[in-house]
Amino acid sequence: MADDIDMAALESAAPRQSFGPIRMLLDGLAAIGTIWTFGLMLLICADVIGRSFLNAPITGVAEIAAHSVVGIVFLQIGATIYHRRMTRADFLIQRVLNWAPRFGRGLEALFFLIGATVMFFIAQAAWPGMWNSINLREFFGVQGLFTVPTWPFRGLIVLGGVAGGIAYLAVFVAELRGMLTRHG
């Protein structure tokens, strides 16, 4: 299976990026998401063991897991965008780049700009919901048994939206610089 991977193509696909503050911030958020994933995995395994062998399930694991997925995705989306690992139709853009390289690069730059706009809209749309959940003291779970406030999870949607927008703007600027140096 590993023999099928063209490492040269992977390494040449994206330009090298320096360890600037944007990359460090986005990679730091992604690392937090990775640690959270590992902790969630341990929690689920402990619940399965407790439920199966000790007849003592851990209360709230399903609720925590359901909300954690959203938090983890939004923590890691900025780094995914910045490192150009978002899912996309490479076969199509590659054909356009081969057919008309300048047009293809312009199309990619437009895609990055639209992506930034969408991510900032996500952050803007989640902002009022975060404040409402704080003001209303909104929780999820079963009251009296297990509850967790919802605002931190809603805050992660805002944070992830802003991080994703910044990441798209950073790759947009890098794409424009690349276009200017190649054709300028």
Image (cartoon, rainbow, N blue to C red):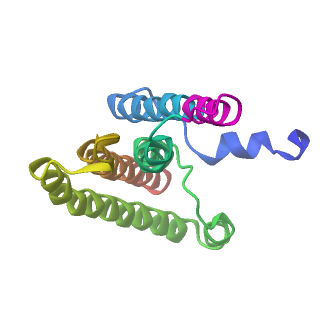
Give above or below for 17 relative to 131: above
Which residue is rendered at x = 38% and y = 54% of the image?
Answer: 172
Horizontal side of 36 relative to 150 (left or right) equals right
Give above or below for 149 relative to 168: above
Image position, residue 132 (x, y; %): 13, 56
Quadrant housing the C terminus? bottom left
Taking depth in this image into account, of 156 and 145 the one nearest to the observer is 145
Q: How many marks?
A: 0
Q: Residue furthest front?
A: 55
**Quadrant in the rendering for residue 120:** bottom left
Which residue is rendered at x = 39% and y = 62% of the image?
Answer: 115
Image position, residue 16 (x, y; %): 54, 35
Taking depth in this image into account, of 107 and 155 the one nearest to the observer is 155
Which residue is rendered at x = 20% and y = 51% of the image?
Answer: 138
Which residue is rendered at x = 54% and y = 55% of the image?
Answer: 86
Image position, residue 60 (x, y; %): 44, 41
Q: Is 97 in the magenta?
A: no
Question: What secondary structure prevails in the magenta region?
Answer: helix
Quadrant housing the N terminus? top right
Q: Residue furthest left?
A: 135
Q: Is 47 in the magenta?
A: yes
Taking depth in this image into account, of 30 and 95 the one nearest to the observer is 30
Taking depth in this image into account, of 82 and 13 the one nearest to the observer is 82
Image position, residue 77 (x, y; %): 45, 47
Which segment did they paint magenta?
42-57
Horizontal side of 112 relative to 137 (left or right) equals right
